Image: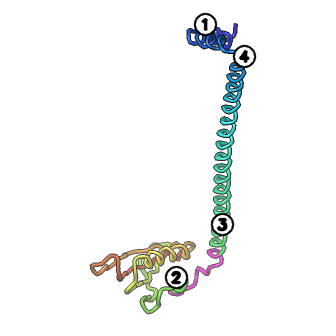
Amino acid sequence: MSKLDTLLEQIRDSETYQQIKLKYDELDSRTKLYVNLGAVAGVVFVVFLSLVISMAKLNGLKSEINDREDLIGYLQRSGDQIKQLQAAQRNSHSQSDTSSPFGSLVNNALQTLGIDPSKVDVGSEHPGSQTKTAAETLLDVKLTQVNLRQIQQLLFSLGEQGALRGISFKDLTIDTKGDPSGWMDANFVVSTWKEK
């Protein structure tokens, strides 16, 4: 005997089922017809309702899948764009002249960022520390009346452009003049090492 048969047997043996069956048997044939039609209509309504709910869930899942596919496509396009930018950056680094003076590197970065050249004082290259095999070259840079974002962008741009030269920064000082959200002055030293 299967579980379904056992369940049906338990329902038939229940007192409630017996009472309903007794009431049903007392009805005349016309009323039985209406009860049967009502039961069929109820079953059809339940089936129809479950189909509508299932279709709504499927449409929701389909919409979610489409949204995720769009997101995946966006991420893939973004990844491709990042790869192209990295390749272009590598090409620009490989084509940059590592023997050109620091001043031109700083001026290129200033021009790219649109920082007013009158707010920047770029000193001349001067020697720094020395070892047996390498010599350090230094360049003093002073910025006046710039905001923090401009300072950050300039340092990042110089670091990126000077990656082949091994540029580093020393002695960064920022004078906020009491208002860190306003205009400020900054001084730093650009440093690189060259083999002798």
**Which of marks 4 and 1 precedes in the sequence?**
1
Question: Where residue 125 sits: x, y (%)?
Answer: 46, 86
Left of 72 or right of it: where is 145?
Answer: left
| Circles 1, 3 touching at the beta carbon (< 8 Å) | no
The nearer-to-camera label among 2 and 1 is: 1
Q: Which residues make up the magenta segment?
A: 92-106
The nearer-to-camera label among 4 and 3 is: 4
Instruction: Kindly identify the residue that appears in the image at 65 percent across and 14 percent down.
Output: 24
**Which of marks 2 and 3 precedes in the sequence?**
3
**Which of marks 3 and 1 precedes in the sequence?**
1
Distance from the alpha carbon under mark 4 to that under mark 2: 92 Å
Q: Tag 4's secondary structure? A: helix
Report the amino acid beneath label 1: Asp
Tell which of 41 and 68 is nearer to you. 41
The verdict on residue 187 being magenta is no
Distance from the alpha carbon under mark 4 to that under mark 3: 77 Å
Q: Tag 3's secondary structure? A: helix
Tell which of 6 and 193 is nearer to you. 6
Q: Quadrant of residue 53?
A: top right
Distance from the alpha carbon under mark 3 to that under mark 2: 21 Å
Q: Where 162 sits versus 44, above or below?
A: below
**Which of marks 2 and 4 precedes in the sequence?**
4
The nearer-to-camera label among 1 and 4 is: 4
Q: Mark 2 highlights which residue?
A: 113
Report the amino acid beneath label 3: Gln
Q: Tag 1's secondary structure? A: helix
Q: Mark 3 highlights which residue?
A: 81
Q: Mark 1 highlights which residue?
A: 13
Instruction: Using the image, tell me which numbered label, if any, was put on residue 142.
Output: none
Question: Does residue 169 appear in this view?
Answer: yes
